[in-house]
Image (cartoon, rainbow, N blue to C red):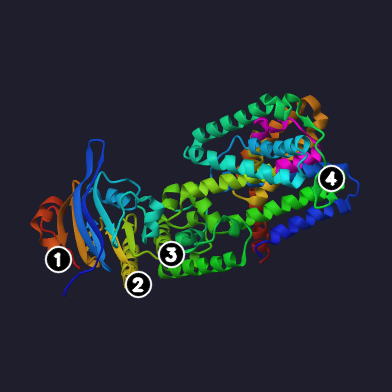
Amino acid sequence: MNRTLHLLTVEGLEQSFGGVMALAGVSFQTPESLIYAIIGPNGAGKTTLFNVLCGFYPPTAGSLCFNGQELRGLPPHRIAALGIARTFQNLQLFFNMTVLENVMVGGHLRARTGLLATALRLPRVRREEQQLREWAREALELCELADRAEYPAGALPYGLMKRVEIARALAAKPRLLLLDEPAAGLNDTETMALRDLIQRIRATGITVLLVEHHMPLVMSVSDRLLVLDYGSVLAEGTPADIQVDPRVIAAYLGGAVQYAV
Amino acid sequence: MRLAGFYLFAAGVALLPVLFPDNYFVTVVGASAGLHVILAVGLNLLMGYAGQISLGHAAFFGMGAYASAILTTRFAWPGLLAMAAGLLVAGVIAWLFARPILRLRGHYLAMATLGFGIIIHVIMVQAMQWTGGPDGLAGIPPLNLLGWTIEGDEQWYGVIAAAMLLTIWLSLNIVDSRMGRALRAVRGSEFAAQMMGVDTARAKTQVFVVSALFAAFAGSLFAHQQAFVSPDSFNLMVSVELVTMVVLGGMASTFGAACGAIALTLLHQGLVVFEDYEMLIHGGLLMVVMIFLPQGLFVGLSQGARRGWANLRSRAA
């Protein structure tokens, strides 16, 4: 039997804002432990798709099935608890905290202690703090940020701030990681380092959903691609398929363009 | 060491009456400052850390005070039991109001909490048969702690100092923990906090209740210490002063809030000699501090001191 396991199954997803259809019936399946990229021109509905997935917008119609569980109707923190973490197109770091503390917030769901135990600093709170710090350090290590742990988050250069967001998401130990334009604003060296990082993340068994405009990065790192245009699926397949798909070339790449992989 | 600052502060609080025995300024003004510290530290959890303003915090201070006053004078309840009832009432009311109120942001939240404070104040004035109306309630018996009756300025200083240190310790614990980080995350980016799995509505409700409990605790001690309560101690101006303490000392710093509370209490005492000009000087000083130390007295000065120390060391090297 050659059955692929699908971590995420999206069916007939619709999202309208007033009269604007941001997503007009999007369906796709994300196999587990792969890098799945979503590309498309600005306004194609990529970030909207992420926001719907995370429970920030309740979808107008359709279903979102994650690991056998329907996400529709769940509040964001419950969806996060199922194992979905994300980064943001516009930085959403906690600038009032250090890098380490930011990443420790990522581990929020992996800890249990409530307010009363915390206020009294019971022994198990201390143990849990240590555990959270350790998890955060592991995530920082993976993102090559260990030496910046004690910096105020706002004191880092832009490229590193984007990495802190990835580390924060990883500290949640998600099964599905949503990266929203992680290469935006990065220089070439940083982008290459990002590619290595995404590959290291996949090697840990985490499925990555990648929204990105940087085509060399997308084509070299992803296992499969979904192309959105005007809120609909234009094409789906491997990078090699997508690069020769005439519909994609016509609508998006704007001619026969080949990228060195 | 995590609590080094706390032990230093506690040592200072304990040494004051030893260094200055029988000193009115230390015991009476110190006790008043201590109550303000409890209030400011609680409000700082809500305002400084979670970023939610409350312009009605005197209401919870009043609930604790009136619960103790009414239950001990009219129903002859023991002081500790009345205090527990006051905490329960303030906690439950805070919990009930938190969800609808904390959905609001910015100016709207300020207006809603302001209205809440005014309503509670009106009840204190109007519910004459319970609260004694504008004249207040007198004859509140001294607080009895398991057989020990607190009497005299020195004893009150000690009890309030202990209560203050307890709340500072609780606050430090909360801030430097999973819960504290969740609160700061709400202030930093509520959107991202939700996405990282923080139940932000719940976190905000919890911190609102905790700050209300701190305030009610201070209120109950205040009622017994003064043996008298009246609505004037819990009006809008008091709420505004509490916010001023937090901002003056430095937001999102427990010792900042404590310093703000102590500084403002001392300022009031020190300016009494200026009589009619007190408010003028008071307002002027606040403006000067906010212009030159926008992060607040404690946070601004400690950052400055750290920078100066680093400069000295680099020059020496």
- Mark 4–mark 1 Cα distance, whole angstroms, equals 80 Å
Identified by mark 4, the residue type is Thr
- Mark 3–mark 2 Cα distance, whole angstroms, equals 13 Å
Is residue B287 shown to the viewer in this render?
no
Identified by mark 1, the residue type is Ala
Q: Residues within 10 Å of mark 2 (few under 14, many from 20)?
A: few
| Front of the two marks 2 and 1 | 2
Q: Is residue B134 above or below residue B47?
A: above
Q: Are marks 4 and 1 in contact (CB under 8 Å)?
A: no
Mark positioned earlier in the residue sequence (3 or 2): 3
Identified by mark 3, the residue type is Ala
Secondary structure found at label 3: loop
Secondary structure found at label 2: loop
Q: Which mark is residue A171?
A: 3
Locate residue B115, reporting x and y percent: 57, 29
Q: Which mark is residue A204?
A: 2
- The residue wearing badge 4 is B27
Left or right, B209 with respect to A153, comes to right
* Chain containing mark 4: B
* Chain containing mark 3: A
Front-most of residues A142 and B34: B34
Identified by mark 2, the residue type is Thr
Which segment did they paint magenta? B218-239
Front-most of residues B178 and B129: B129
Q: Residues within 10 Å of mark 1 (few under 14, many from 20)?
A: some
- Mark 3–mark 4 Cα distance, whole angstroms, equals 49 Å
- The residue wearing badge 1 is A240
Secondary structure found at label 1: helix
